Image (cartoon, grey):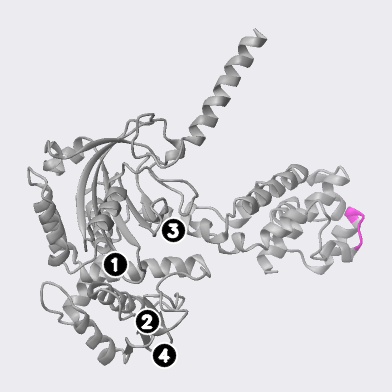
Amino acid sequence: MSTENIKIIFGIKIKSFRTELGLSLQELSKKAGIAISYLSEIESGKKYPKPEKLISLARALEVEYDALVSSKVDKTLDPFAALINSELIKQFPFHLFGISARDILGLFKNDPENAHAFLQTFLQISRAYDMSLENFLFAALRTFQRYHNNYFPDLEKLANQYVSQNRITGETINFDQLRKILEEKYLYRIDESELSRHPVLGGFRSIYRGKGLLSINDRLLPPQKTFILAREIGFIELGIKERPLTSSWIKVQSFDQLVNNFKASYFGGALLIQQDRFAKDIKEFFKRREWNGDLFADLLDRHQATPEMLLYRMSQIIPGVFGLGTIFYLRFTNSGDRLSVKLTKELNMTEVLVPYGLGIDEHYCRRWLPLRLLKKLRQNNLSITTGVQEIQFVKSGASFLLLSMARPLSLAKERESAIAIGFKIDKQTKSFIKFLNDPSIPEEMVGETCERCPLTDCSERVVEASIVSMQNKVKIREAALQEFIE
């Protein structure tokens, strides 16, 4: 147990013993011969008394010295000890929200019995709904991004400086340029032969094997390979030591590791799709009076990017440079089964409840443009497809403009990915996106998932509105009960 946690547990024990004897803080102060201000700091978990004061406290509280200083607690305080030593408390980034672990525990210590019940309930719910530490950490990361509008000027500046300092020329940066830098400047060894042939690890995009050895899957698209090298330079230039070794997460070790990976990835994206040039292209594209899907797809070639790289970079530049911050970013992937569509990445910077819940067992609304593109991609055997759509949510009435791209996944057979960026339609959006008034843009009423959608005339529904039906039954019963009582 850490020194900090020992202080907090000790403070809670002192208050518990004092309360059992019916002593006020002032009465215990007088009985133990300890200043009331110092005693208050002890109970708050800020101070741990010296041996002579511990003896005085044990006498005043009428407990054995060993029972007082032991890290063991009685069953009333068991939940406190479990919580303070849990990985959630140790790893959760409370500082993002301006609070500390001590503040969290301070909410509970005034009423141990109710706190015990609350914590037991919390732990049971977290187990029942599989709320792992990783769920909390990824949620905290999204909060971190939203707080900064998903735009980090310091990282943008570092990426621009890196291009100048290393005399990287050309409108776009390619794999060979970055490979040369990593090998000559940082003494890296880049291997593209082993990973794709590994029977277990062949699904990873890359693995850093330590000591400058980086394995890259040779089945990746050229922009994906280039991004891996750009992110690797990010780890080096940002001085990051605590980092994941694999391209996708096996297990998140800490929030610092999660943030470090995000920062290196941000640097890599800013290095490859440079702010000034991309912002100019975005402005030119959005000032057109008519939607043009071909020009939208041309941005991929112009910036040597995948759809995910391009639209995610857009989710950084548009809020950061143009101040259009009420947006969301979503990535869906499917499998061989038409019904199996999962939300694999999301960042919602609006107040509207858009599709959410990574990995939930519900069926996302098939009226959504990205899901329609997934279907179109497979039926027509396309390498890429793009689209635009204006949606209005059935429940909230909020309207958004969606831009979306879909493509087959590089490392998974019979699976595709669709990425969408959504802009809430308001005065600012209408002023910035000129083709919003294009009559050719399809309009659609949408829900979140089929289970939660009240629409009764939807030809694309894949399952019944079970959650809506259940909610309606409850309302009918409540109305009948009220009528019966009256």
For residue 333: magenta?
A: no
Mark 2 crowd level (few <14, some 14–19, many ≥20, 10 Å Cα)? many
Name the residue that disc number 4 marks: 211
Q: Which residue is mark 2?
A: 196
Nearer the N terminus, badge 3 or badge 4? 3
- Please state which of residues 233 and 14 is positioned toward the viewer in this rendering: 233
The residues bearing labels 1 and 4 have C-alpha atoms spaced at a distance of 25 Å
Q: Is residue 110 visible?
A: no
Callout 4 crowding tier (Cα within 10 Å): few <14, some 14–19, many ≥20: few
Q: Secondary structure at mark 3?
A: helix
Estimate the spatial distance between the alpha carbons at disc 1 and disc 3, rounded to whole Å: 17 Å
CA gap between label 3 and label 2 equals 30 Å
Of the two numbered discs 3 and 2 in the rendering, the one whose residue sits closer to the viewer: 2
> Which is in the foreground here, disc 1 or disc 3?
3
SS at mark 4 in the image:
loop
Q: Position of residue 4 (x, y in %)?
A: 66, 65
Residue wearing tag 3: 141
Q: Residues within 10 Å of mark 1 (few under 14, many from 20)?
A: many
Judging from the image, what secondary structure is the residue with disc 2 in? helix
Q: Earlier in the sequence, mark 4 or mark 2?
A: 2
x%, y% of residue 71? Answer: 79, 65
Q: Which residues are magenta?
A: 60-64
Closer to the N terminus: mark 1 or mark 3? 3
Q: Dividing the picture into quarters, in which one does residue 23 lie?
A: top right
Q: Amino acid at mark 1?
A: Leu
Going from the N terminus, do you reach mark 3 or mark 2 first? 3
The answer to whether mark 4 and mark 2 are in CB contact below 8 A is no
Above/below status of 407 relative to 267 = above
The question of residue 61 being in magenta is answered with yes
Q: Nearer the viewer, mark 4 or mark 2?
A: 2
Residue that appears at 27% across and 38% down: 391
Discs 1/4, front: 4
